[in-house]
Image (cartoon, rainbow, N blue to C red):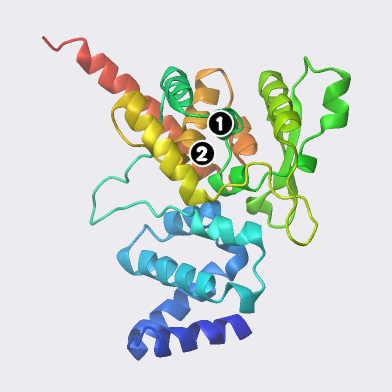
Amino acid sequence: MEQRNKFEDWLRGMKGLSERSIKEYLYYYDKFGDHKNMHQDGVDKFLSKKNQSSPVKAFITNYRAFLLRHKEDLGLDGIEEKAIRDIEILRQTGSKEKKLPECLSEIEIKKIIQALSSEKNKLMGLLNFYCGLRISELVGIKYDDLNWDVWREDPTKNGKLKIKDNAKRKKWAIIEVPAFIMTRLYAWLMKEGLKKLPDGSIAPIFRIGVRRWQQLFGRASLKALGRSINPHALRHSCATWLLDNGFKIEEVQKYLRHASIATTQIYTHIRDKQVEEKYNSLFQD
């Protein structure tokens, strides 16, 4: 209730909204829940239920701004803050069809990774795609999040990466990391060494922010494919790659940690669209 009251005061004082708009936003707040639901899957699920109307999206936009502005007062940890910053709100107006997320082929992704300038950035691209990570999860990886002791016993096997599962709030999710990525990542870490933060704790291995990674990937994709692409497309691409390689929709949902299977099912629409376009191209001169 305290957070709800602060949000109401912020809407009235900082935003200067009318009482009618404030009442509408508080109605959506009660339906949405508090900041624990403010992550990509939570927002996708909420917008799906509410048909992505403009007032609902305006509520999400304002609530996200409120949380980020008052993150310290609200006690948000670094993972929650990154998850909130990384949220994408798909555009939809009127009765137009929902915009499908951009998905790349494995070949296109390999071209972009090759265009990245350093081994560090290439490793980020590989993890982003093959592990289906959100950008906030990628930049937050720490050395102890990987099962190095077990993996070193047999480096031909995949490694394991544990990350906070936003769909299940404070629980951990275990992600498969291909053996070839583990090998390259371990070699790079042994060369670079682990960095410490001022408080003595071990810093995330990549020491990079979300926006910087977006810039680097955008430049590499422009060089490789002729267009700038947001690295969040790698997570989308992982979903279609898994489906193309025989994974069931429920398995993809589990691997990508979607709270609702409705979020995962959008990728079947992408595959249908791709088949339609390929079929139509057969009859073009």
- CB atoms of marks 2 and 1 within 8 Å: yes
- Mark 1 burial class by Cα count in 10 Å: few <14, some 14-19, many 20+: some
Residue 178: image location, x then y, percent? 68, 22
Q: Quadrant of residue 101?
A: top left
Q: Secondary structure at mark 2?
A: helix
Q: How far from the left and from the top, in percent, is residue 243?
A: 52, 24
Q: Residue at coordinates 28% horizontally, 16% vertically from top-left?
A: 278
Q: Amino acid at mark 1?
A: Ile
Residue 106 in view (yes/no): yes
Q: Which mark is residue 233?
A: none
In the image, 80 versus 36, the foreground residue is 80
Residue labelled with disc 2? 264
Q: Quadrant of the C terminus?
A: top left
On screen, residue 62 above or below 247: below
User: Residue at left 71%, top 20%?
Assistant: 179
Q: Residue furthest left?
A: 285
Number of callouts: 2
What type is the residue that disc 2 sits on?
Thr
Where does label 1 land, which residue?
249
- Image quarter where the N terminus lies is bottom right
